[in-house]
Image (tube, grey):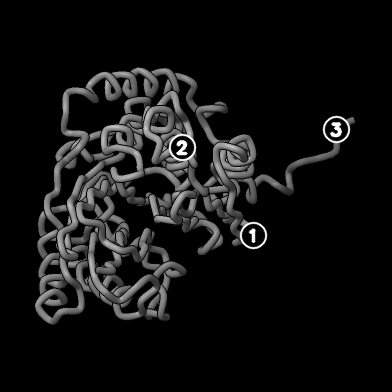
Amino acid sequence: MKVTLSVIKADIGSLAGHHTVIPEQIEEASKQLQNAKTSDLINDFHVTHVGDDLELIMTHKMGIDSKEIHKLAWDTFIHVTENVSKKLNLYGAGQDLLSDAFSGNIKAMGPGVAEAEFEERESEPIVVFMADKTEPGAWNNPLFRMFADPFSTAGLVIDESLHDGFVFRVMDVEQNKIVDLKTPEESYDVLALIGNTGRYVIHSIYSKKNNVLAAAASTSRLALIAGKYVGKDDPVCFVRAQHGLPAVGEIIDPFAFPHLVAGWMRGSHNGPLMPVSVKDAKCTRFDGPPRVVALGFQLSGGMLVGPSDMFDDPAFDLARSKSNEIADYLRRQGPFMPARLASEEMEYTTLKTVLDKLKNRFEESS
């Protein structure tokens, strides 16, 4: 059977700054989605969070970019904002909701979306990744390692079903254009683009052998939509596993290396992406470090079985320790690059108002 998986997130207000949601927000969102399930609009759902982002994971039969599903998510975010976040004066209530009215597709309105329609296999393991205090380019490194790096994914070498490689659909978020590149033969071209994580982001990945969808990721850049800094993008993505695709263990292993991502405090700093359990998905130190959560599900007839909290495992303790070590090192550099982002990224942050104030005081040097 065909099923659509939609993972939609939004920052709609946090307890004590920007670090976490509260149980009342999750409970209220769950009520809204339960009503949608009862009315058969969606098959199943799971509501969770990472940092201050509310995450809606839904299965349904409406296909991608469904107006009904996107409106459900939008109305849920609005409902929780009005009935919980604003009533309790939570900080940044409705922060990611950049419009007063739904316009048909939630992607252009602030929330992040990763979704795809596919034929459910006999056994359908899926890992959903959700990150806070970073941007969509944060997925570039681990997704490349999952699907194109034989030093990371052993199946690329020893499993004949993976030998043909994968097609990476890469988006230029500034020009809103996409390009399909094949690995392994175009691996260097892929890296030439996705190494620039602020501009080129992985949109989706397909098996070259049979065109099976392997991964889908959110690509929205809030600053490019709003024209100013209104919060970091906090991306989501999901990856299908096994049966001609990387194994679950190969999918989560890249996160054992806490690579540097853009975001962290005020969206203006580089920091290590720390893999954590949902219970530890609270961005505290310097509003971070950036966090990533992984939830493992089985799909069964369009229903979500699970989840398993994949990073709630001592196997990732060293990654968390290394993240803290990297965070210490970067924080000691204070406002200096490369701890602070490069100037082109800072144009969309609160630094712009400081520069505007000083611009008339600059004079020609002798």
Relative to 180, is 203 on the left or the right?
A: left
Pointer 1 local density, CA inside 10 Å: few below 14, some 14–19, many at least 20 = few
Relative to 208, is 255 on the left or the right?
A: left
- Real-space CA distance between mark 2 and mark 1, rounded to the nearest whole angstrom: 33 Å
In this picture, is 273 found above or below 174? above
Comparing labels 1 and 3, the label whose residue is closer to the camera: 1
The answer to which quarter of the image holds residue 272 is top left
- Real-space CA distance between mark 1 and mark 3, rounded to the nearest whole angstrom: 36 Å
The quadrant of the image that shows the N terminus is bottom left
The answer to which quarter of the image holds residue 56 is bottom left
- Outermost residue toward the right? 366
| Residue holding disc 3 | 365
Q: Viewer-proximal residue, 196 or 2?
A: 2
Query: How far across and down, in percent of the image, does residue 198 sit?
Result: 55, 45
**SS category of the residue bearing label 1:** loop
In this picture, is 79 found above or below 89? below
| Residue holding disc 1 | 175
**Considering only order in the chain, which callout, 2 or 3, is on the residue closer to the N terminus?**
2
The quadrant of the image that shows the C terminus is top right
Pointer 2 local density, CA inside 10 Å: few below 14, some 14–19, many at least 20 = some
| Residue holding disc 2 | 163
- Residue 264 in sight from this viewpoint: no
Q: Viewer-proximal residue, 81 or 66?
A: 66
